[in-house]
Amino acid sequence: GESVGLHLPTLSVQEGDNSIINCAYSNSASDYFIWYKQESGKGPQFIIDIRSNMDKRQGQRVTVLLNKTVKHLSLQIAATQPGDSAVYFCAENTAFSGGYNKLIFGAGTRLAVHP
Amino acid sequence: ETGVTQSPTHLIKTRGQQVTLRCSSQSGHNTVSWYQQALGQGPQFIFQYYREEENGRGNFPPRFSGLQFPNYSSELNVNALELDDSALYLCASSSKGEQYFGPGTRLTVT
C-alpha cells in the first residue's frame, strides 16, 4: 500500500525501548484528545483517548499525558515492538454549535522500530 | 477492524471529472464524517452527516458534497476534480463521540 507520512518527522527506537511521541494542540476549548495509529494503506486506528479534565490515562502498554497549560499531549509506548511501526497522529475533538464535532489532527510522527 | 467499509479502494480520474465515494458505517452509528488526507499530512475534516443532514463543514469548496442514507451509509461527491484533490479519503462513523475510521479510498487525479 501507499505509504503515509513520507515527509513526517521520524522517531527511531530499538525494539524493547520505550517510545515517547509528542504533540502540540491549538484549541484550549477541545474537550477530548485521541491518539491514532496509521499503518501504510490503512485508516487511522484508535489507540487511546483522554478527557480534558484528566492529565494522565493508561492503557495496555500505552500512556497518554495531557498538559493543558502548554497545550501539549504525549503518547508513551512501553517495550516498543516492531508491530508498533506506523505513523502516529494526535487529534483534538472540538464540539461546535449545531451539535457537530470534528477532529483536528496534528502533523503526525513516524515511529520506526529497529530489531 | 472497525466495521466501517469504504468503496472503491482505489480509483483514477481525470481532471474535470466527477467522483462518488461510498462509506458504510458501523452498525448503530448514526453519524458519518469525511476527511481528506493528502500524502504526508494528517486528515482534514470535510463535513459531517447526522441523521441524513449535513451538520458541520470544514474549509472545503461546494464542489465537495455528500449524502447520508436512512441506513446511515454515506456518499462523498466531488465535482470538477482538480489535481490537488488527489488524496486518501477517509470516512469515520460515530455514535456518541469516538470516531471509527474506514480503510479509505485512494483517489488519484491525472
Image (cartoon, coloured by chain):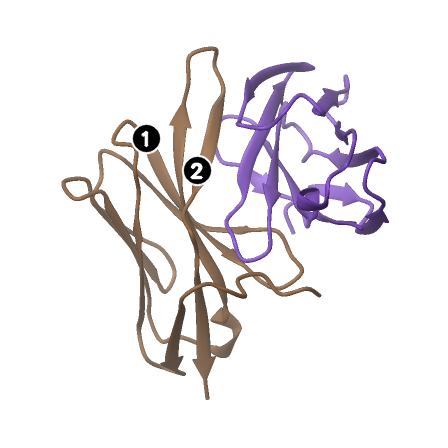
Chain colours: A brown, B purple
Residue at the location (72% across, 45% down)?
A: B83
Q: Which residue is at the front of the view, A17 or B77? A: B77
Q: Chain of mark 2?
A: A
Local crowd size for mark 1, using a 10 Å CA cut-off: few (<14), some (14–19), many (≥20): many
Tell me which numbered mark, 2 or 1, is placed earlier along the sequence. Answer: 1
Q: Are marks 2 and 1 in contact (CB under 8 Å)?
A: yes
Residue at the location (59% across, 24% down)?
A: B48
Q: B94 above or below A41?
A: above
As drawn, the residue found furthest toward the bottom would be A115
Mark number, residue B58: none
Give SS at disc 1.
loop
Give SS at disc 2.
strand
Q: A42 above or below B78?
A: below
Quarter of image, res B32: top right
Q: Chain of mark 1?
A: A
The answer as to whether the residues below labels 2 and 1 share one chain is yes
Q: Is residue A15 left or right of residue A44?
A: left
Q: Of the residues shown, which amino acid type is indicated by label 1?
A: Ser
Front tag of 2 and 1: 2
Q: Is residue B62 left or right of residue B98?
A: right
Local crowd size for mark 2, using a 10 Å CA cut-off: few (<14), some (14–19), many (≥20): many
Q: Position of residue A96 (x, y in %)?
A: 42, 18
Tag 2 residue:
A104
Q: Is residue B18 left or right of residue A30?
A: right
Q: Of the residues shown, which amino acid type is indicated by label 2?
A: Ile
> Which quadrant of the rendered structure holds the N terminus of chain A?
bottom right
Q: Position of residue B44 (x, y in %)?
A: 53, 39
Residue at the location (28% across, 27% down)?
A: A29
Q: Position of residue B109 (x, y in %)?
A: 78, 48
Tag 1 residue:
A30
Residue at the location (53% across, 26% down)?
A: B58
